[in-house]
Amino acid sequence: MCNSLVNKYNVAGPRYTSYPTVPYWDNMSFSLKKWKASLQQSFNESNASEGISLYIHLPFCESMCTFCGCNKRITKRHDVERPYIKALLKEWSLYLELLNERPKIKELHIGGGTPTFFSSENLEFLIKGVLRQATLAEDYEFSFEGHPNNTTQNQLQTLYNLGFTRVSFGVQDYNATVQKAINRIQPFENVEAVTSMAKAIGYTSVGHDIIFGLPFQTETHVKKTIEMTKELLPDRIAFYSYAHVPWLKGNGQRGYQETDLPSGESKRAQYELGKRLLSEVGYHEIGMDHFALKTDSLFKAMSTNSLHRNFMGYTASKTQTMIGLGVSSISDSWYGFAQNVKGIEAYYHLVEQDIIPVFRGHILNREDLIVRQHILNLMCHFETSWTIKTLYIDALEDIVFSLREMEADGLVVINDKQIKVTHKGQPFVRNVCMAFDVLLQRKQPSTKLFSMTV
């Protein structure tokens, strides 16, 4: 890739798991009452036809990984498990009362934190408690995130028996120097063991998460990590850029200096190298920073134009309604977003009072909904189009004008009613989306909010 393009377009920008992005939510006009109405509308429109998605956040970790920007609580005390699960189930009951109908679950994902911090018995208690008052869509998919160092065969078997068929393991990088810098020491043998166990049990999609742009990381490290990963041949791989956002409150990104991080050009070279090595053994690029074998559901979703993106990342199917349970979880009704409180004690306090524990959110207006669809189209399909009746917005002429320079650089092709991201432009898809982000264009942030786009 041309270094001049990397230098030109490597700016701070959102990853667009939502639009509007969280810093641009209108929290002042948001209310729990409005969120409930938004969710009820979406649920009534979509539950019977497509079902809903459910995300469950388990925040506990035994140690701090210094590359992580997720909401977590570091502890070695496992007596925290059952009280937290009981609070999750209480929150779920509050949503069930609001919806007044048995939800049909199409997707369920457990993230963290470290979900495999929890014992098999408590994971079973949680999932059975959630499913007791729900039905399952015909083509449902359950997935969870596992830590290679503490995921046991019993956990894998227990969750598989409950309907889980997809698991992703955080690998990051196999180099000892990089692992020490990010405080994530895990030998290849541990990853190999859990990957083999999952496949033997019957999981149909085993994924590995690999990060480039980590402190002290070089192209040699990335090459070695990819070569070792190819030995295990996971079904899908998330190969994504380290998001350096140390200014966020509670972030664990410390223990190394800015000068220890690879440059933008080096990061992009790491990605291009990894992408080439993955393609050589049959992995196909899916959307942004994801790769899958042809047998994986993510590849099939791309092939059938049904790929979707939300706060859980890329998913193989779309649901209009997504409910997030647990601290810091974000729910999405399509018409609105709501995020739960981030502190565990505050979370307990609210659910004990029968209050859905959201603390901020955003109700989308007409312009938001149109821009959201454009950005979703670009992130999932690398193209978007418009007509007067559907996805036309007042700012469209300005958006198209702002993309002319990217067109001159060969990154997009602009037609009368369509914009396509070229193969050359795919690494810059976040930059293309930023042109559509009218809220960002109207008010550039005065402080650091986002990671770099390249």
Image (cartoon, grey):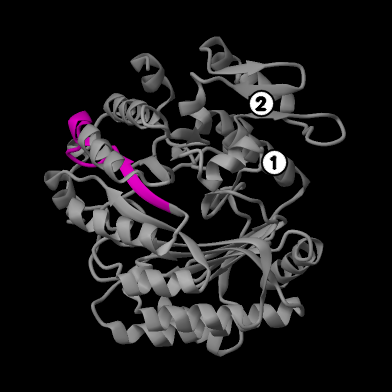
Q: Which residue is under mark 2?
A: 399
Residue ID at (25%, 36%): 227
In the depicted structure, whether residue 32 falls above or below residue 256? below
Crowding around mark 1 (Cα neighbors within 10 Å: few <14, some 14 to 19, many 20+) is some
Residue 21 percent location from the top left of the image:
56, 48
Crowding around mark 2 (Cα neighbors within 10 Å: few <14, some 14 to 19, many 20+) is some
Q: Which residue is under mark 1?
A: 373
Q: CA distance from mark 2 to mark 1?
A: 15 Å
Residue 191 percent location from the top left of the image:
26, 55
Q: Point out the residue furthest to the right here.
A: 389
In this rendering, does residue 314 appear at all?
Answer: yes
In the depicted structure, whether residue 390 falls above or below residue 109? above
Amino acid type, label 1: Gln
Image quadrant occupied by the N terminus? top left
Between 396 and 152, the residue placed more toward the observer is 152
Q: Secondary structure at mark 1?
A: helix
Residue 404 percent location from the top left of the image:
61, 15
Residue ID at (41%, 17%): 5
Amino acid type, label 2: Ile
Sequence-wise, the earlier of marks 2 and 1 is 1
Magenta range is: 206-221
Q: Secondary structure at mark 2?
A: helix
Of marks 2 and 1, the one in the foreground: 1
Q: Is residue 4 left or right of residue 374?
A: left
Residue 300 percent location from the top left of the image:
59, 41
Q: Is residue 269 left or right of residue 424?
A: left
Residue ID at (37%, 60%): 200
Between 348 and 384, the residue placed more toward the observer is 384
